[in-house]
Image (cartoon, rainbow, N blue to C red):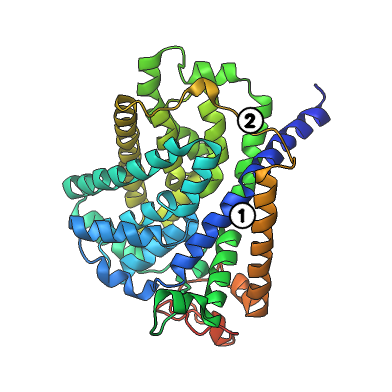
Amino acid sequence: MSVVHAVLHALSIAGSMTWAITWALILGFLLSAIVQAVVHKATVARLMGDDRPRTLAVSSLLGMASSSCSYAAVALARSLFRKGADFTAAMAFEIASTNLVIELGVILALLMGWQFTLAEFTGGPIMIVVLALLFRLTLRARLLRDAREQADRGLASSMEGHAAMDMSVSGEGSFRRRLLSRRGLTSVSHVFVMEWAAILRDLVLGLLIAGAIAAWVPDSFWQHFFFSGHPLLSKIWGPLVGPVVALVSFVCSIGNVPLAVVLWKGGISFGGVVAFIFADLLILPILSIYRKYYGGRMALYLAATFYAAMVVAGYAVELVFGGLGLVPDQSEAKIPTDGVSWNYTTFLNIVFLLVAAALVIRFLRTGGRQMLAMMGGSPDAVDHSAPPAVHPSHQGRHHGHGM
């Protein structure tokens, strides 16, 4: 196989994957934007003041309504911690922001099957509970104090400006009335486009990496690596090695789902897939951000405790789903390679691409370009030259959308 043919083959697989999930991604981000349009970030921190089970449940629900971009989720969790949120609650919020969001569930169901969506929404809460227990048993007051001092320095990193923006709609009236108002539609368009802008790089990278691995790495390599010929050993090994593969892939959030498809077809265990997807918060760039936000010792502590929680969640999902007979037949796993043909996928893609185009047009007509320019800024920076539609204050409030 020539180099050119190999590259084209990889791009063909990446393109087929992209076409297969386009409508689902647009639908997922649209539903997420609708939720975020009526949830005010400024009210979140006061609901996260301790690590009681009820508070952690509320933090997780709030995270589910937040950004699915891992970088923005990490930045927002640090912001909430600085504003008085409990550290455990902030980490629960962060995990839910990337692993319990609508768009992740939709794309998992489409590419891998509903069982993986159910596993994700089962394993996520388990991971949060395990992490909370580890924090309660091992997190020392001095380490937490040092982490807070480092966090209060406010060092900027990736997606800080995006995390600081609150594009929700304030005011009275029912959910439906606020959502269908001019301000509501503008808010939805702003959240929708900003979420796409936040994850697009990782999504494209994930699709390209998945296409390259699917085209160039034979299944036999993965079968040996994951011990797929030894059922018990495979189930033990999968959750242990899944996060390690994610760690070095440099792909986070939804972008690692295409690679999860390749790993599942290659022979990783069901629990290993779940642990791999959870590890979007342990990739090397984000570990570097933890060091900047909370200091080196806390970064190492988060790496160790997050990894342990992911592994336990992977084992739990493997045991529960295996016991209930819900693990899909791995031999039937396949990577989308059909390309474009006239079927329901093409019809849905056309419909949802038109919806996306309408939202992008409204975004551009209501101050969107200025918001994009502020995505990577410091959360504490106040740009007085920005119009009210895109002006993130110290509290992150953002209600005055342009019409």
- Which residue is located at x 31 percent, y 43 percent? 127
| Location of residue 60 in the rendering, given as x and y in whole percent from the top left corner | 32, 56
Taking the view exactly as shown, the residue that stands out farthest to the top is: 229
Q: Residue at x 34, y 41 (%)?
A: 123
Disc number at residue 213?
A: 2
- The residue type indicated by label 2 comes to Ile
From the viewer's side, name the closer residue of 230 and 285: 230
Identify the residue under disc 1: 200
Residue drawn 54% across and 86% down? 388
Q: Which residue is painted at 17% across and 58% down in the image?
A: 52
| Residue at disc 1, secondary structure | helix
Say if residue 12 shows up in the picture: yes
- Of helix, strand and loop, which one carries label 2? helix
Q: CA distance from mark 2 to mark 1?
A: 20 Å
- Lower position in the chain sequence, tag 2 or tag 1: 1
Q: Position of residue 394 (x, y in %)?
A: 42, 79
